[in-house]
Image (cartoon, grey):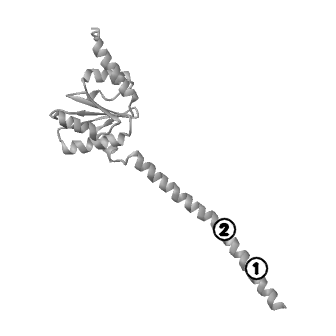
Amino acid sequence: MADKPVRADKATAVAELTEHFRASAATLLTEYRGLTVAQLKELRRSMGSATTYSVAKNTLAKRAAAGAGISGLDALFTGPTALAFVTGDPVEAAKGLRDFAKAHPLLVIKGGVYEGRAMSAEDVRKLADLESRDVLLAKLAGAMKANLSKAAATFQAPLTQAVRLVAALQDKRTGDSGTAA
């Protein structure tokens, strides 16, 4: 039996979701059953401004993921599903989801996709445990600065020793010429 033709509004929805999947650094899937509108608004804020959180029909989301070349998510598209499309730092969004889920147990993190690979709910929790990109970059810069300071001291040490040697030789020479006279 052939697939039913897709209505224009559904085709538009699939195209929009496909574009979101392609443009996102990560996509996190949740089940939002039982959350109020106010809680959903709070959740959107907690994930940061670079994350778009929207409810989607499972069949349309499956088609969009397949259209974007993403596989391994089909099992996650059950029950009421909302998608968090992250265009910024995925760690920040994952932390927001994790913290919100701790405060509101009705939110269930199902999994997601990061860098083209499917992630389990546990993988999302691990992602949330990482430090943010800005913190990691700051640590890297600090480590590089410390290593440069060590290198400068290492390069400067032979020069300092050479100056001391020349000064000692000069003192010895001055001392030798003073006793010989």
Q: Residue at x 41, y 34 (%)?
A: 115
Residue 95: tell me if it is visible: yes
Q: Residue at x 48, y 55 (%)?
A: 142
Upstream in sequence: badge 1 or badge 2:
2
Q: Position of residue 2 (x, y in %)?
A: 29, 8
Helix, strand or loop status at disc 1: helix
Q: Position of residue 33 (x, y in %)?
A: 17, 32
Report the amino acid beneath label 1: Gln
- Circle 2 packing at 10 Å, graded few (<14), some (14-19), many (20+), is few
Residue 108: tell me if it is visible: no
Helix, strand or loop status at disc 2: helix
Q: Which residue is mark 2?
A: 158
Q: Is residue 103 above or below residue 86?
A: below
Q: Position of residue 77 (x, y in %)?
A: 25, 27
* Residue 170: mark: 1
Report the amino acid beneath label 2: Pro
